[in-house]
Image (cartoon, grey):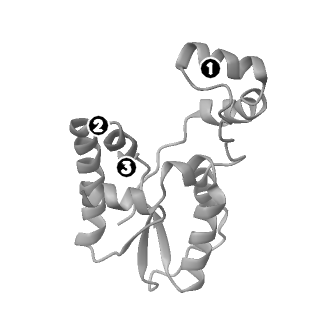
Amino acid sequence: MAHRYKQEPLLIRIFAPIANKVLPLKPVRWLLEKTLGIDKLRIMPTYAEQSFEQWFNERRRARKQPLSATRPKVALFADTWTMYHESNVGIAATEVLEALGYQVEHVPYQCCGRTLISKGLLREAKKLAGKNVRTLQGYVNHNIPVVGLEPSCVTAFQE
């Protein structure tokens, strides 16, 4: 069940390195506290140099030969943190699954809704989870196992 991946927004690629440089600065942290209520002592997470989706798509294009169609498929759901902050987790998972003989399909990215649940925004979370469950159901209907990297995201679908 192959999906076409929409191109990652250019702004994310452009502003991630800039954000990594300016977010630790005291004046920026002060401004975030005054405007958004984020405590100036809070260290903001850095963005990965390359998102997991960007790595995955570039790797697919760079392959000289596609993976064998006889390999069993597995769908990999990468959460927001893996997608944009610690892409090395998604990269390692892909490499392990491929080493085990699987053809990895990256589930089109969408937030799981866990943060909405934690804030009590249950209607919004239910809509988002419903979209994800419908997407994942497409894999399940084709007998493709789904692997989630973040347990809290997987439980968001279950809840």
Q: Quadrant of the N terminus?
A: bottom left
Residue toward you, 148 or 67: 148
Q: Secondary structure at mark 1?
A: helix
In the rendered image of this protein, does residue 36 appear above or below residue 24? above
Kind of residue indicated by mark 1: Leu
In the picture provided, is 7 more to the left or to the right than 112? right
Per the model, the C-alpha gap separating discs 1 and 2 is 23 Å
Q: Quadrant of the C terminus?
A: bottom left
Q: Secondary structure at mark 2?
A: loop
Q: Secondary structure at mark 3?
A: loop
Q: Alpha-carbon neighbours of circle 2 within 10 Å: few (<14), some, or many (≥20)?
A: few
In the picture provided, is 126 more to the left or to the right than 90? left
Residue 46 in percent (x, y) is at 69, 41
Q: Choose top left, top right, bottom left or bottom right for residue 116.
A: top left
- Residue plotted at (66% across, 61% down): 88
Per the model, the C-alpha gap separating discs 1 and 3 is 26 Å
Which tag, 3 or 2, sits closer to the chain's start?
3
Which tag, 1 or 2, sits closer to the chain's start?
1
Circle 3 or circle 2, nearest the eye: 2
In the picture provided, is 72 more to the left or to the right than 20? left
Query: Mark on residue 120?
Result: 2
| Residue receiving disc 3 | 112
Q: Alpha-carbon neighbours of circle 1 within 10 Å: few (<14), some, or many (≥20)?
A: some
Per the model, the C-alpha gap separating discs 3 and 2 is 14 Å
Residue 24 in percent (x, y) is at 75, 30
Residue toward you, 86 or 31: 31
Q: Alpha-carbon neighbours of circle 3 within 10 Å: few (<14), some, or many (≥20)?
A: many
Residue 65 in percent (x, y) is at 61, 74
| Residue receiving disc 1 | 32
Residue 153 in percent (x, y) is at 39, 56
In the rendered image of this protein, does residue 142 appear above or below residue 40? below
